[in-house]
Structures are given as structure tokens and as C-alpha cells.
Image (cartoon, helix red, strand yellow):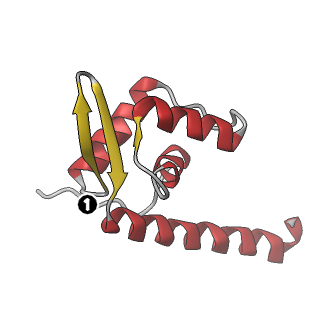
Amino acid sequence: MAREPLRVLTESMFYVLLSLLRQERCGTEIVEFVDNTTAGRVPLGPGTLYTILGKFVEERLIEETAVEGRKRTYRITERGRALYRQELSRLKLCVEDGEREGWG
């Protein structure tokens, strides 16, 4: 039975894709970007990060661009950009719903 492709991202997944929108990064650079961008609100440990990266490579949302020893560098694919835009739109709708119901 084929696996369902990702349609909704976790917060960590969202920030991993965000980290790759403007430049290629290795794992430690991704963690640093997410930590700085979220002021530490979204913790991204090695187990979580490498599980996400493996899933994203498998689903062709990102691809490896360089391997130097254990260091791997990644870039987002067009498919990954499309999923990021889709998720950003979904999150905006969630915020609009919350604001409309008086919580904004």
C-alpha cells in the first residue's frame, strides 16, 4: 500500500522548509536558523531534524546537494516550495478563523 504524501506539516517541518527557501543549508545551519527565527520556541533536536530530512528527501521535497564526510547540504525542490506555499496559506486561514471568532 502506497504511503500518502504529506499534506499538512508539523511546526518543525514548516520551519525546516522555511530555512531552505533562500539558501542551501546543512543540518547544523538548519537548526541554527530555526532557533534564531523562532527565538528558541521550536526546539529541533538531531533525532527530529534527521527524521524530517529523511522524509523530505524521500518525498522529493528537498534534495542533497553536497556530502562532505558526515556533513550533508540540502536545498528545497519546486515540490517542496509548493508544499510550503500550501501550508503557509493554510496557516493564514487558521489565523483568519481565530481572528474572526474574536480571538485576534
Relative depth, front residue between 25 and 1? 25
| Few, some or many residues within 10 Å of mark 1 (<14, 14–19, 20+) | few
Left or right: where 90 falls relative to 64:
right
Query: What's under tag 1, amino acid-wise?
Result: Glu
The x, y position of residue 16, in whole percent, is 47, 46
The x, y position of residue 21, in whole percent, is 48, 58
Left or right: where 20 falls relative to 56:
right
Q: Residue at position x 49%, y 34% from top?
A: 29
Left or right: where 102 falls relative to 57:
right
The x, y position of residue 4, in whole percent, is 25, 60
Image quadrant in which the N terminus is located: bottom left
Q: Is residue 100 above or below residue 77?
A: below
Relative depth, front residue between 76 and 98? 76
Q: Residue at position x 72%, y 37% from top?
A: 39
The x, y position of residue 91, in whole percent, is 61, 66
Q: Quadrant of residue 104?
A: bottom right
Q: Is residue 33 above or below residue 89?
A: above
Task: Please tell me whether mark 1 sits on a helix, a strand or a loop.
Answer: loop
